[in-house]
Image (spheres, rainbow, N blue to C red):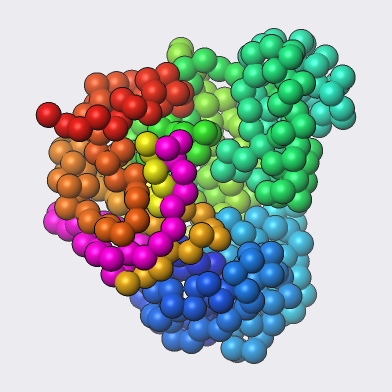
Amino acid sequence: MFDRVLIANRGEIAVRILRACRTMGVGAVVAYSEADRDSLAAQLADEAICIGPADAKRSYLSPSAIISAAIVTGCDAIHPGYGFLSEDGGFAEAVAAHGLTFIGPSAEVLERFASKEASRSLMARHGLPTIPGSEGMLRDDEHALSEAARVGYPVLIKPSAGGGGKGMRMVRTPRELEASLRVCRSEARAAFGDDSLYLEKWLEDNRHVEVQVVVDRYGRGVHLGERDCSVQRRHQKIVEEAPTPALPPASRAELCDRAIAAVVAAGYENIGTLEFLVDRDERFYFIEINCRIQVEHPVTEMLTGIDLVATQIRIAAGEPLGFGQEDVEVRGHAFEFRINAEDPAHEFRPQAGLVERFYAPGGPGVRLDSHLYAGYEVPPFYDSLLGKLVVWGPDRPAAIARSKAALDELVVDGIVTNRSFHRALLENAAFVEGRVTTNLIDRVGTAAFLAPRS
């Protein structure tokens, strides 16, 4: 096991990794930017080291700054969290070249799955159904138009690198496609340094379902069930739950079994998430794999009792998985609500400022992963995620009831958050009945989730 781990991330995930290290008896050093000098992670860490200015390109996205910080502080491993450099094969290779361990898939594995289009082809060869789409990357606008005509409108423009909804557009006509390609390329280039795009057939009223997998370096893997991430705005997840209401138990089992078989056969390693779309007829299609810990991993932890971050660290240290599929038990139902510094009444506009009061909810089955505290200044430079409210219940109705109580208890004063949006969502009939699709918010309209409760 490692002696010291450098946590090369910020916000709630930095605190989450720090806590995992503490339970394992592993020293933890937090790398922070100047904007995060007073962050909770930096205050709780065994040691904290500044790696650069607020600009992420010169701090959290700077391989040299992060590796230097790890060496200076005597760390023997680096945990990248999610986002930033977590799926960067070049960074993982540089970490290994300096005699350090990258906590995540190896550089070779990251490179193999770096392209979404290539991953789709690879997983199709290992038996997973995929959505019809373009053959290879889009060379130019003319190629995009011809591929869209072949696939059939509507189509979804997707960046080959990255995620989080950046560089994605659904288009219904050739004119919309031409107008969107330049915007998507620009967004992808700015977000991921790679403007390559491809197309997928758009499935109307689809569900977004993902499977959590864990594979050790010896080729032994298990799945930890699935999660439903269909509540989205602008292709970005804001609520996750498990098990998915989209599929009956037999179909869920088939999805998970096929996912783990395919990813093991493809030579994957460490924690990963395979993402699928599910159509109206309950057919599922593989779309991408995320080679890192997911924002929504606590949902799975609440259902299985397995610490995914600690498992990730152990596998990176060379330990065998230590349990088999027969040992995984999924119990009850869980939700995760992403508490963001954003204003739902104004197109989810990001917010920043001083947190004047902060009260965390509690009670049975309630967990809040957050880096907030009263007096914390939310910086304007990074993602708007403030925390994740995760609620478990013995069944879905009980989990919804607990979620309402927990959201009512949560207090974040001084900045605008999306808490009220989540609370109104829990009163929406489609959500309560489990009839959620990825276009629910667009179809119903944000205003439906802003009206005060009676």
Number of residue marks: 0
Front one among 442 and 370? 442
Is residue 82 left or right of 450 when viewed as pictured? right
Vertical order, 193 against 280 (above or below): below
Q: Is residue 263 among what the camera can see?
A: no
- Taking the spot 33% from the left edge, 21% from the top edge, the residue there is 435
- Horizontal and vertical percent position of residue 32: 54, 75
Front one among 104 and 342? 342
- Taking the spot 52% from the left edge, 26% from the top edge, the residue there is 277
- Taking the spot 71% from the left edge, 42% from the top edge, the residue there is 188
Vertical order, 274 against 281 (above or below): below
- Taking the spot 24% from the left edge, 21% from the top edge, the residue there is 429
Residue 28 lies within the magenta run: no
Q: Is residue 375 among what the camera can see?
A: yes
Is residue 205 left or right of 63 when viewed as pictured? left
- Horizontal and vertical percent position of residue 346: 42, 37
Is residue 54 left or right of 114 when viewed as pictured? left
Region rendered in magenta: 346-374
Quarter of the image that includes the C terminus: top left
- Horizontal and vertical percent position of residue 28: 48, 80
Vertical order, 307 against 31 (above or below): above
- Horizontal and vertical percent position of residue 325: 42, 47
Residue 349 lies within the magenta run: yes
